[in-house]
Amino acid sequence: MIVQESIIVEQLSKTYKVSEREGGFGAAVRGFFKRKYRDVKAVQPVSFKIAQGEIVGFLGPNGAGKTTTLKMLSGLLHPTGGKANVLGFTPWELKPEYLRSMTLVMGQRNRLSWDIPAADSFLLHQAIYRIPDDEYKNTFKELDELLELSPLMKKPVRNLSLGERMKCELAVGLLHRPKVLFLDEPTIGLDITAQARTREFLREYNRRTSATILLTSHYMADVTALCERIIIIHLGQLKYDGGIPELSRKIAPFKLIGVMLAGPNSHDLSKYGTPVENEEDQEKRYIQVRTEDVTVVTARMLADLPIHDITIADPPIEHVIAQAFEG
Amino acid sequence: MLRIYRRMWQVNWAEQWQYRANLVMYILYWIVQPIIYIAVWTSIASARGSVSGLTANDFITYYMTMLIVDQLTSEVVIYIFAYKIQDGTLSGELIRPVHPILTNTLMNNIAFKGLTTFVLLPVWTVLFVLFQPNFASVTTANILLTVPAVILGFTVNFMLSATIACIAFWTTRVWALYRLYGVPFALFSGQFVPLQLMPKIIEDIAIYLPFQLFKYFPTQLILGKLSNEEIWRGYTMDIFWLIIALILFRWAWRKGVKQYSAVGA
């Protein structure tokens, strides 16, 4: 089987020209006559390929260039340099055929009209994307089951809560069954149940339609649940592109050893490894050990200490990624 | 495509009703101005019998007809579109597979006309009762002849303003520029006084500018005040400016979208 690339990005970059001035009245007046411009390199040349049907997590700290990249790939922004090809189209040419086959969901106030009930925006969307009535009904039913949209449809969008609005934005963005999904924080503002459902829905959508999904999220649960591959970008540069387990190995070649000791808890564990906090498990005490030393250290601990229970695990993905951002 | 326009109409029409107070202020400003001109010129014309051959009735019918023509040819593109570039709300529309200005902005503008008609009608009726104008010069043939002029007038007006709105892609704000555009507009459109009362030089220039196509030309056409030669010239100018406006808009849009910085989330 030939793997088809949905998204091909070559040396894509974006530099913004930003006018800047200092605070204060004098500076404001000077700024009127003579603007100072500064180049902000939002995205430095990045390259990657994403195959059809892949779900890729696009990660990086605030201001890393994730959203800018998504905006370029969806066609909103013209890049300063480089090339991109999504489904055979150059996104920023804004060809209707392209726009009909992709979606960009970002934040709120995007596709929904603020002043009218969501239902009206949905119907408008149906017309714009030329979705036949029966297909529209089926898709809406599916979305409704997963996201419980019906109670929200009659209210003006301005009266919906952040989470409710996000659900509607996501749903309206998927009505035309896009082949490529760019999702910028798709679960932001959702409660735990809705988050889990959205993930479930995205996975199911991906399985059924083989759609390609590129998503950013600050919830690592989204990333670990959905993505087999992640791309990390920091200060506009590509830092990592690969699987999550490989990232752990590459960035953080550590394991966490957790022990529950019998008797008084006064033993000094620092001679075996670096003690670390683990908020999820307060009963055990944890130390961080280099992967290659795990066997030796475990053997020593078992010999030295009155061990009641011992576990060896990978460090949490949040820690790994945080380390990747720094590196 | 028809379905898209129908749904956009529904959405925009529903949206219009959300801002009633806004609308009332706006319409008062819009309608009060010609009413003042009527009052001023009719009193002058009545006192002196006529002004440069124009009687009180000529002024009343001119401004009252212009109220209707203006309702049909005026546009509010700057108000409904330019801010979307500024605050980034254009993003949602830009990635839809239809042209934002030629679909949504257009329907929004037409929905606004629909709404303001509700204000115009009673005002017009009151003026009619108050001034008792004589519209004897208006014939069915004139009305039919004016229909294309009104449609063309609106199209040219809309496209030129849309071009100015596109400048917001570069400058973020376009209000000052739009105000500046309003100066020749006011002078050459015939909005203050019928153009024949203007100095000869202004009248001569106005003929070749687009502004008279939005107000003066359709108004005089419907009132039967134009010679065949003037009608031909008017329509030629309509076509000429339509082409210019379309070229300018297409150019500004294409270049502008490249500049768009999609601010906000």
Image (cartoon, coloured by chain):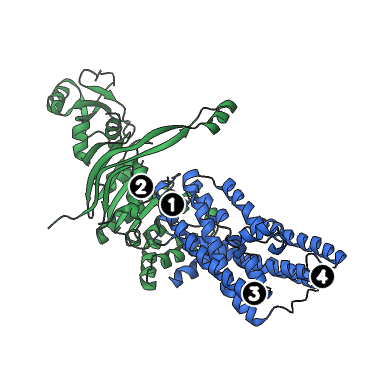
Quadrant of the image containing the C terminus of chain A? top left
Residue toward you, B231 or B186: B231
Image-based side of A35 in relation to A217, left or right: right
Residue B17 horizontal/vertical position (percent): 61, 62
Mark 3 belongs to which subunit?
B
Mark 1 falls on what kind of element?
A: helix
Q: Quadrant of residue A232?
A: top left
- Label 3 is placed on what type of residue? Ser
User: Pointer 3 and pointer 1: residues touching (CB < 8 Å)?
Assistant: no
Image-based side of A285 in relation to B35, left or right: left
Which of the two marks, 2 or 3, is nearer to us in this view? 3
Q: Is residue A314 above or below residue A180?
A: above
Mark 2 belongs to which subunit?
A
Q: Quadrant of residue A278?
A: top left
Instruction: Determine crowd level at label 1: few under 14, some 14-19, many 20+ residues with C-alpha closer than 10 A.
Output: many
Q: Which mark is residue B227?
A: 3
Q: Which mark is residue A222?
A: none
Q: Which mark is residue B91?
A: 1
